[in-house]
Image (cartoon, helix red, strand yellow):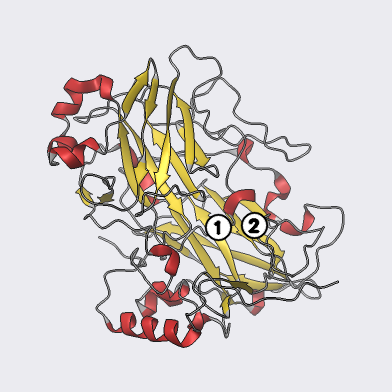
Amino acid sequence: MTTPLTPRSAYPELRQDDIDREVAELGRAPTTGPHPDRDYPPYRSSVLRHPKQPLIPIRDPEAVELTGPVFGVTDVTEIDSDLTRHHIGEPIGERITITGRVVDRDGRPVRGQLIEIWQANAAGRYAHQLDQHPAPLDPNFTGYGRCITDDEGRYHFTTIKPGPYPWRNHLNAWRPSHIHFSLFGTAFTQRLVTQMYFPGDPLLPYDPIFNSVRDEKARQRLIATYDHDLSRPEVSLGYRWDIVLDGPSATYMEQGR
Amino acid sequence: MSVEEPTPSQTVGPFYGYALPFPGGGDVAPAGHPDTITIHGYVLDGAGQPIPDALLEFWQAAPDGRRTGAPGSMRRDPVTGAVIGRNGVDFTGFGRVPTDPDGRYVLRTLPPGAVGASAPYVAVCVFARGLLHHLFTRIYLPDNAEANAADPVLSSLPPARRATLIATAERDRVYRFDIRLQGDEREETVFFAFH
């Protein structure tokens, strides 16, 4: 039995054309840096969830935030980075690997730090009660993983390519395929939660979250590269995605290992 | 000098709940520690409504001012892969708490120690659906009135703004600290940009 997909939106009067127009208008304004504007109306949920008062600058070399939490071998297990091995059976979908390097904005590798990912399954459904759109759950796929970066700042995940899914920002709104990434640097100020997208996804131009990064070059840095040398014959397709953490840190020191 | 262009932030979205929170995420104080304090409150939007899908992270100095932290916040069972929680001895300095359906969070920790010229504080990083780039704030405690008065950040702020950073004592060792993402200068919590 299938449930008919009723086109519901939190803003039912809003159409993709309206969002596209807003995105285009904001895209013409001067950019303010690599990160999204917190006040970005095309993403309707941001309207009441961004500060209106100016942020207070801090330039204190002893700020606690210039150091950060540490993680170690007790915080991850061996198979955490292979999301296809968390259940008895094989998940459905296109098996992929994602690898890359995490560095700070001075180019120094981020060593021994925690990366967490989460994502929808191949059908675009999250293993989350609040995701009730009529796509199947996969009993062999939950969709979260972790790893600790190595001495060069490298990470590696094996997973399934997530499907696109509908959401209710506006009528007929679809998120492009993406994997959520959470990263720690050597400082709390370097904390990053972001989303990795796939090259050539036709939904990217329509997505207000992706386009909230108004700087074109910065936006392209959210898209992984397909790397044929990383593909494994008859097993998986390989993607590369390098990550640069923003934010100051205390004098570089060995932490977390 | 920066040589690398940063990877942009994106919202944490609504579906992080099965990936990021972990049991005992708000229990930063070692089990049964007599100095444990409780900090709780609500995360609120620009209409004053609670935000049920925010995620708060906390990072702080140990009571003696050490900022080295310790691994083991998310200790896992190597056999089953289950999260077994902190070992109850080490102070990791790190906490992570999703807001509940009421928009509320609770943190049990040890009082932060002072570092440098600052009054003691707990650093907070706020994530939420609808928030495209996380926000940093700080929780200062009302008990440290003298240190708070001398704190370079607090003293640089007008009184109405300063007040948003200081928790309210409710009873012994229990404090209330709400985080309002948007509002007028009395309502909206002070957020920071680090340079």
Q: Which residue is mark 1?
A: B14
Instruction: Tell me the tag on residue A29.
Output: none
User: Crowding near pointer 2: few (<14 within 10 Å), some, many (20+)?
Assistant: few
| Residue A66 rendering spot, x and y as whole percentages | 32, 42
| Residue B140 rendering spot, x and y as whole percentages | 29, 31
Residue furthest out toward the top = B34
- State the residue in front, A96 or A29: A29
Examine the rendered structure and indicate whether residue B109 appears above or below residue A240.
Answer: above
Spatial distance from mark 2 to mark 1, Cα to Cα?
8 Å
- State the residue in front, A202 or B54: B54
| Quarter occupied by the N terminus of chain A | bottom right
| Total number of numbered discs in the rendering | 2
A253 vs B75, left or right, is left
Task: Tell me which amino acid carries mark 1.
Answer: Pro
| Residue A151 rendering spot, x and y as whole percentages | 52, 50
Mark 2 in CB contact with mark 1 (< 8 angstroms) = yes
B142 vs A241, left or right, is left
- State the residue in front, B177 or A175: B177
Residue furthest out toward the front = A13
Q: Which residue is mark 2?
A: A130
The chain that hosts pointer 2 is A
| Residue B69 rendering spot, x and y as whole percentages | 45, 31
Residue at x-position 34% and y-position 58%: A50
Q: Quadrant of residue B109?
A: top left
Task: Tell me which amino acid carries mark 2.
Answer: Leu
